[in-house]
Image (cartoon, rainbow, N blue to C red):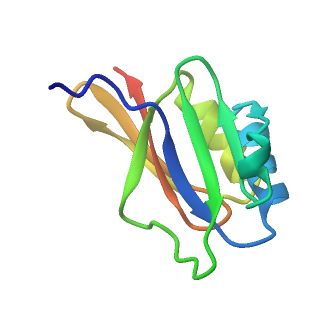
Amino acid sequence: MALLAIEHVQLALPLGREDDARIFYTGVLGLPEVPKPEDLARRGGCWFETDGVKLHLGVEDDFRPARKAHVALVVTNLDALLAGARAAGCETVDPAPFQTWRQAYVYDPFGNRLELLEAL
């Protein structure tokens, strides 16, 4: 047995905040939304996917943001992405060197932390 890949990552969002998720994940991060399967769509939430990144957001009744736990996303043009996030009112942490990366953080509209990594 061997683990081969992460198929997707799911984060939580508060009930009724899907439009805010769309503004951030599509508008700021550039991830296109994909339709959820019909049997899952009635639960709320939304999915954002490219060929290499799949982030699913599910409604959590007793929502608490993931302020420490996070997904790390490899990006290009980190400075422009952070500038767009700041312009949209998102909390960010400035880039710093980390091993072979420039590392920064951005928080989605619900307070979930996302790590952003750009190759040095």
Quarter of the picture holding the C terminus:
top left
- What percent of the width, then of the height, locates residue 25? 70, 43
- Quarter of the N terminus within the rendering: top left
In the image, residue 32 sits, relative to residue 76, either above or below, namely below
Q: Is residue 119 above or below residue 78?
A: above
Determine if residue 17 is in view: yes
Question: Relative to residue 119, is residue 89 drawn left or right?
Answer: right
Q: Residue furthest left?
A: 1
**Residue 114 drawn above or below residue 17:** above
Residue pictured at 59% horizontal, 17% vertical: 51
Q: Quick check: can you spot residue 91?
A: no
Task: Report which quarter residue 77 is drawn in.
Answer: top right
- Nearer-the-camera pick, 80 or 62: 62
| Foreground pick, 45 / 82 | 45
Residue 4 percent location from the top left of the image: 28, 22
- In the figure, is residue 92 to the left or right of 57? left
The residue lying furthest to the bottom in this view is 62
Query: Which residue is pictured at 31% across the width and 28% down the height?
Result: 101
Tell me if 82 is positioned left or right of 36 in this view.
Answer: left
Tally the marks.
0
Measured from the top left, where is residue 86 in percent x and y? 68, 52
Q: Nearer the viewer, residue 107 or 38?
A: 38
Residue at 38% from the left image edge and 32% from the top image edge: 6
Farthest residue, direction front: 39
